[in-house]
Amino acid sequence: MNFPFVYEGQPYRVLFGHGMLGELPDEAERLGCGRLLVLSTPDQRAAAEEVAALLGDRCAATYHDARMHTPVEVTEDAMVVVAKHRIDGLVALGGGSAIGLSKAIALRTDLPQIAVPTTYAGSEMTRIIGQTEAGEKTTQVTAKVLPETVIYDVDLTLTLPPKLSITSGINAMAHAVEALYATNGNPIVQLMAEQGIAALYRGLPTIAQCPDDKDARRDALYGAWLCAICLGQTSMALHHKLCHVLGGSFDLPHAETHTIILPHALAYNAPAARDAVGAIKRALGGDGIAGRIYDLAEGAGVPVALRDLGMEESDIDRTVALVLATAYANPRPLEPKLLRRLIANAWAGVRPD
Ligand code: NAD
């Protein structure tokens, strides 16, 4: 346990449960918003139109073109809608892409945001905004982008396809795993991290088999929320650095990359993170924690090898170099040979112990 520590509570309001979307009009009123813009990706257009209908006169416009990694040209396009309709608040329905667009608009306008997350990615709980311009991703940390209100409606996650649910859920687990050994961790976040991993580990295997199971969906979304708080409160380490390099340099998909890397990053750090390992063992119900997470992914039929995402074997050395060039603080020092082995194993899909 980290003593002494700093714990900084965040000023968001969270509603959690089945059917919570029904509270949206009241939450809009609470924030004093009467000309809202509803944001989504193209895939969730129909669901976003239903949200607009629920808001009635309080919805001034909808925008359905949110994309992964928050491209600046998309934000600029949405800003035209904001100005044209004199928007006074934002509702983001969806995963990290829709919420990223909402944050990018809030960064430029300070408009209040209501996030309605429908994946387990966790952006809604962080002050982080990543934006992409001309293929370059830059990240800022500012309280301006933190949503004022977050509505977690378990029912909205029922349509998240099972495989995407598993990769998104393991992506969430990764936030909690790294929070457990973060240099700026604290006992409160550690409680949430352990509970978050446990709830996801309870829910995800059932979702893989029965995506309509409401209890499993509730467990997974609750776990994802706790893990998102962890992401928002602590600095991340080797696992997130690797995923950032792999996503940014080789355009690998976000949640799948996290899913493949997590067991390997965890196996690498385990010898230097005894307390974290203890918490993860309790959360997963036994030893062999890296192998258990690998088995969860493999059992659900999602990729466990970077080569299956299209990464070339010849890119392994470049990945090592990029990770070492600007490494994040990590519990175990980065040894080039061991790091190379980690990435090679993840590339080939070797099961860690
Ligand atoms: P995403 O938002 O792109 O969603 C993936 C796909 O799933 C989309 O096509 C979406 O329309 C669809 N979808 C989402 N919810 C659904 C549902 N309930 N039913 C059916 N389809 C649904 O992907 P993501 O993994 O949620 O987010 C990834 C993005 O978020 C990346 O750009 C990542 O960098 C960013 N992110 C940012 C932070 C942060 O703190 N700033 C944290 C985590 C992720």
Image (spheres, rainbow, N blue to C red):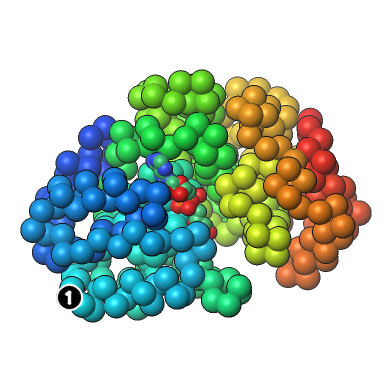
Image location (x, y in percent) of residue 14: 28, 48
For the C terminus, the image quarter is top right
Q: Secondary structure at mark 1?
A: loop
Name the image quarter holding residue 236: bottom right
Name the residue at 21% across, 77% down.
Answer: 84
Q: Is residue 253 above or below residue 111?
A: above
Residues packed near mark 1 inside 10 Å, few (<14), some (14 to 19) or many (20 plus): some
Please say whether residue 191 is visible from this viewpoint.
no
Residue under the point 57% across and 47% down: 255
Q: Residue furthest left?
A: 57
Please name the residue shown 65% across and 48% down the image.
Answer: 257
Which residue is painted at 23% across and 35% down in the image? 19
The amino acid on which the numbered mark 1 sits, given as a three-letter code, is: Arg
- Residue 86, image x and y in percent? 17, 75
Q: Position of residue 306 (x, y in %)?
A: 74, 46
Q: Which residue is mark 1?
A: 86
Above or below for 293 versus 258: above
Q: In front here: 199 or 134? A: 134
Percent position (x, y) of residue 318?
83, 64
Quarter of the picture holding the N terminus = top right
